[in-house]
Image (spheres, rainbow, N blue to C red):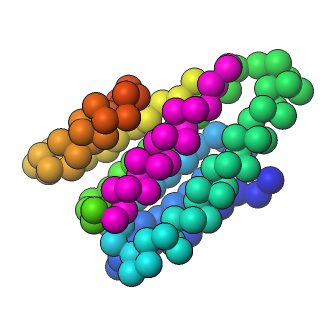
Amino acid sequence: MENYKVEATENTPLIELDHNNHTLLFQGDSRPENVQQFYSPVIEWLDNYWKHLYFLKDLNNASIKIDCNFKFEYFNSSSAKYIMDIITMLSKFDNGVTLNINWYYEEMDEDMQEAGEEFEDMMGVKFNFIQL
């Protein structure tokens, strides 16, 4: 399995998915012109990662900690659907997997803080809220 990285642009976030360190990073603005085309490789990577984790757990018989860091400055409603899909996929990683979802927001950005709180409520997954 390979790591996945997409550099940030004016309309798309930096994405770094690292299966070795079990860290996932989404950072910047997310308003891609074709949101499905942009996020489909991420969903596919996460599906493969899920399979990889089960292989690792069977091999090592150890608990795995995943840190997922959302550091969005802005995302549109189309991106929100894919963010929810990502969180849904991650919440299914169980049986020896500890998931830490870290939601970062600027001190004055109440909208981003509230967006994270709404995701937490809707998805039923505990978030760590980190003020920058």
> Which residue is painted at 46% across and 42% down in the image?
87
Question: In the image, is residue 30 above or below residue 22?
Answer: below
Q: Residue furthest right?
A: 59
User: Which quadrant of the figure has residue 72?
Assistant: bottom left
Q: Is residue 76 visible?
A: yes
User: Which quadrant of the figure has residue 35?
Assistant: bottom left
- Taking depth in this image into account, of 118 and 1 the one nearest to the observer is 118
Relative placement, left or right, of 19 versus 115 is right
Whether the magenta-drawn stretch holds residue 90 is answered as yes
Q: Is residue 28 visible?
A: no
Relative placement, left or right, of 52 versus 44 is right
Question: In the image, is residue 37 above or below residue 91?
Answer: below
Magenta part of the chain: 78-97
> Which residue is painted at 24% across and 36% down in the image?
117
- Taking depth in this image into account, of 85 and 100 the one nearest to the observer is 85
- Taking depth in this image into account, of 38 and 68 the one nearest to the observer is 38
> Which residue is painted at 49% across and 48% down in the image?
86
User: Which quadrant of the figure has residue 42?
Assistant: bottom right
Whether the magenta-drawn stretch holds residue 41 is answered as no
Relative placement, left or right, of 73 versus 99 is left
Q: Main secondary structure of the magenta part?
A: helix
Relative placement, left or right, of 7 versus 72 is right
Question: In the image, is residue 30 above or below residue 127?
Answer: below
Residue 56, given in percent of the width and then of the height, sits at 82, 32
**Which quadrant: the C terminus?**
top left
